[in-house]
Amino acid sequence: MLDNALWISVALFTVSIMLNLYRVAVGPALPDRILALDTMYVNSIALIVLFGIWLNTKTYFEAALLIAMLGFISTVAVCKYLLRGDIIE
Amino acid sequence: MEALYAMTTGILAASGLFLALRGRTFPVVVGLTLLSYAVNLFLFSMGGLQAGAAAVIDDSGNYTDPLPQALVLTAIVIGFAMTAFSVILAMRARADLGSDHVNGNRVDESREERS
Amino acid sequence: MSLLLIVLLPLLGSLVPLMGSNERRNACATMTAVAPTIALGIALAYMGQVLDGDIPRAAVSWIPALGLELAMRLDGLSLLFVLLILGIGLLIILYTRFYLADGDDMPRFYAFLMLFMTSMLGIVMADNLLLLWVFWELTSLSSFLLIGYWYRQSEARKGARMALTVTGAGGLALLAGLLLIGQIVGSYDMQVVLDSRELIQQDPRYLPALLLVLLGAFTKSAQVPFQFWLPHAMAAPTPVSAFLHSATMVKAGVFLLARMHPALAGSEAWLYLVGLTGLVTLLYGAYFALLKHDLKGILAFSTVSHLGIITLLFGLDSRLAVVAGLFHIVNHACFKAALFMTAGIVDHECGTRDIRKLKGLWRFMPLTTTMAVLAGAAMAGVPLFNGFLSKEMMLAESLQTPLLGGLSWLIPALATVGSLLSVAYSLRLVRNVFFDGPARDLPRTPHEPPRLMLAPVMLLTVICVVVGLLPALTMTALLEAAASAALAGDSPELHLAIWHGVNPALLMSLTALLGGLLLYLQRRHVFAFQRQFRPRDARLLFEMGIQLGVRIAQRAIDSLENGSLQRYMLWLVIAVLCVAGSALTQTSGLQGPLENQPLDGLLIAGAIIAMFAGLATAIMHRRRLISLLMLSIVGLMTSLAFARFSAPDLALTQLAVEVVNMILLMLALFFLPQKTPQESGAPRILRDVLLAAGFGGIVASLNYAVLTRPLESISDFYLENSVPGGGGHNVVNVILVDFRGFDTLGEITVLCIAAIGIYKLLNRLRLFMPSSDADGRPWALDHHPAILGTVAQTILPLALLVSFFIFLRGHNAPGGGFIAGLITAAALLLLYIARGVDWTQQRAPIQFQPIAVAGVGVATLTGVGSFVFGQPFLTSAYGHFHIPLIGDIELATAILFDLGVYLTVVGSTLMMLANLGKMTTRHRPSKNKEQA
């Protein structure tokens, strides 16, 4: 049961990551791309967690934690760039 | 799987090199970063590709090779330092030479970019 | 041990004069003389032992892996030279005291002189071939310094450079020769080499080794065709010339011939090469000595000629000839040093060395004149002087040689001609300068030099006369000891005496004397004859050669190094393609024995995304921001790949670096142009695409080839010893902070240095700052959006907690100093982004440079700490501790090291990025004013 759920969710998240990629590549506007990139980070968090569940290990959960935290910082930096150009002023 | 992995490193390396051959500093820096991703992946794979065998001693007894990982870990950090250094160098070159061309040609830039 | 002192004392002595000052010259000279005097005392103390046939040796191991030992010996040959070098060296020190003008830097001169003396002593006493070569090169270097002592004169610089080039090149040849000999014999030990004559001479490598060694000896001893540097070394101060020509430098070459005589001599090649070179040099030097007008020039060519005599003697196949050669070395050293010093005095007193302007000096300086006459007579080989004895031995031996078969009579005949010329130029030197009517038009009115300046000359002249009168009493013992070393066996019986009865040698001597007198009187014919030739200045030829070399090198450089970094990159890549590609074609097929592992959808998707994003980064590189977003996707995929393939530490590091890198590139994007202009034409793009494709293909093939072959790793050791040895379960971290901690220490040092370099580069940097984004929209006016600020402040403590957690558990689970440091840095950078530099600095006035340096310091101290417990650098210890409420934890000293890593990473990262941010803050207000 869990296995099936696992596989279905992995498949779905994989598809959504591919769709994110499409949006980053196509745009059209810069905010679209940035948003898509951020969503990509979120989806990869899910993938890592699912991977950990599949392997039955906690080893990889910190990676998910870090993506959550640092992916945000990345996005903030890009947004700040769009707004002001100079990100540390 | 190995073939796919090798193809990925190859394509990343090729893209990185293509960028590194460009004439402006920014693409070169991006290219070097890309190249360092490829190199890190390449070096990392020297220990073999295994899933769920992290080199953390536990009861499983199934570990991947930790040595390439340790080397790549420092390589990532040093790679960042190198990128940072070349970025600042590029800025300095632009400030002093008025151009962001890697050859340091004193070409006139479009005016609106000067402030 | 005290043997080593003979060499080491003058070496230490070279520091002594540097402590003296130019004003207190007497003190400076006296202090300098102390070390060589003691060394001379030690050598004399060994004298009795050496004359009895003992060979004192002393050795200290230096680089045993190379067969290099600091080994010294004092056999008869060494002793002879040591006495010459130290004795004449001391006289030179005394003479220099009065010779140097007030403006000359005396401490520097003495320091160079002592260094030179050391290197000469090293050559003659070395008991190891390689050591001998080390000192040999040291003489080339120190003589360069001495010849170029008056470095403001272009002549001196050129002369010094020429001497260094010629003797240095010869030195390299010598090294090759000595290495060959060492390979033949299997040892660099002098005694072993000298005892292996048969072995060496039967080896096919004997001839090249001999040629190379002779090349070294001939360049040093100024034998034709390498004689040209010596006359140009005359630009040196006269004491240097006196030392260089008498006891040192040029004598090093003939010393080498004597030293290697037991091992290399006796073969036909040796006889022809050495004998004929000597003969030609003898005639060449003597002829040109007659033609020169410069006092020192005459002496220089006469040195060339006399070195020819010595070389000829070593090349004659007779044991007595070798003894004669050694004898002539001593005699020549004495009279040539005396004559050079006299020439120096004349130059000093009259202000010119041109023999055409000097005349009748005996009225002004009778004592000096006497000395010059006596030393000149010795040089000419007049009976009752030492020069006569060795020259007569030379003539006698040359009669015996069968070297040229039926034409062997040529050798004594030519030797007589050489002696005849030598008589003529000696006569011209002495008579024209000191007699020949009253002096006229001298730049200065000369008078006798200070008594102490003349003392060395007197002493040397007295030696010349005493040896000439009582040769058997004074020289026999020393010469026999030296000859037994140079001949590896008992010395032939010596009968040094003035009168051997009427024999062919005496007749040849008399012919030379009379003929020389006649030639001197008729010398204008010789000058007239020489005038028919176009004068060829060796220096011009040499300079032309050098210039040609420089031009060729310059052209090669110009064609390769045209300032285009793109071009260099291209060549580099092509080189890599060729080397790696050709190596890959040698492998036995791409696919190794291992089968591919099965694929799954997730992997395929990940690979597709990574490849796509990588390609997109390259293709869209002209739209820089989009290219950057794509790069960020590649980074994300890389870290996911690390996670997927069992490298959680790498995944964490990659993620953290990814963020910091992104911030860095955002800053770069702002300060660099935001678009890349279209520059490359289609052919260039095509070329680069092809190159990149080739490169990618090679990387991929290599990677695949490795991945499909079985893995042999040394990692089992780390896996087994991580817990018992390093006290940590996370092997990657234990490797970083414990097993290979020294590497890590180096790497954080590099990180710190890079950060400091960046900090320095930012100094006085004037940045270009765009006023609108790439599409021309002006920037928003809200500097620090409130929502962002609030969120950032909320996240900061959380992020710090996470980084603390990751840091602490790093030893046992994925994490560690690198990752924790990057997380902290990223969190702080978020605050900088959200609130700005001023706000942050107000609340947390932290300087990051000290933090980074402190990090390296902590890591180093942790390593040094293990010395306290008598353990090697970076030995770690660990133990279990019980902390209330938290429970049992395992702590290792490695965590301290990791703390150093953490601090360095935080400090360096922020030093790079925050400082860059500060730059803009500093400039921005003024810019806003301008806009307003």
Image: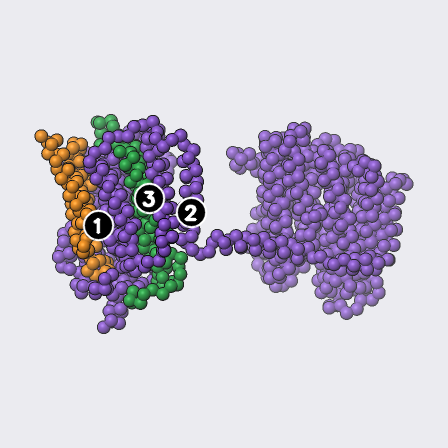
Q: Position of residue C911 (x, y in %)?
A: 29, 54
Q: Position of residue B37 (x, y in %)?
A: 30, 44
Residue behind mark 2:
C572
Nearest the viewer among C547 and C839 is: C547
Crowd tier of the residue under label 1, counting other residues whose Cα lies within 10 Å: few below 14, some 14–19, many 20 or above: many
Write down the chain letter for disc 1: A
Chain letter, green? B
**C757 sits left or right of C403 in the view:** left
Disc marking residue B13: 3
Q: Which one is in front, A1 or C210?
A: A1
Furthest residue toward right: C502
Classify mark 2: helix, strand or loop.
helix
Tell me where residue C378 appears, x and y as whole percent. Answer: 80, 50
Task: List the single residue furthest toward the front.
Answer: C682
- Give the residue at mark 1: A25
Image quadrant where residue C503 sits: top right
Quarter of the picture containing the N terminus of chain C is: top right
- Tell me the residue at 22%/37% (across/down): C603
Dot 1 amino acid type: Ala
Do the residues under discs 2 and 3 have CB atoms within 8 angstroms? no
Residue C142 visible within the image: yes
Labels 1 & 3 near each other (Cβ < 8 A): no
Q: Residues within 10 Å of mark 2 (few under 14, many from 20)?
A: few
Q: Which chain is purple in the picture?
A: C
Q: Is the C terminus of chain C in the top left, top right, bottom left or bottom right quadrant?
A: bottom left
Up the image or down, C900 lies above or below C770; here it is above
Q: Is there one chain holding both mark 1 and mark 3?
A: no
Left or right: C571, with C162 as reference point: left
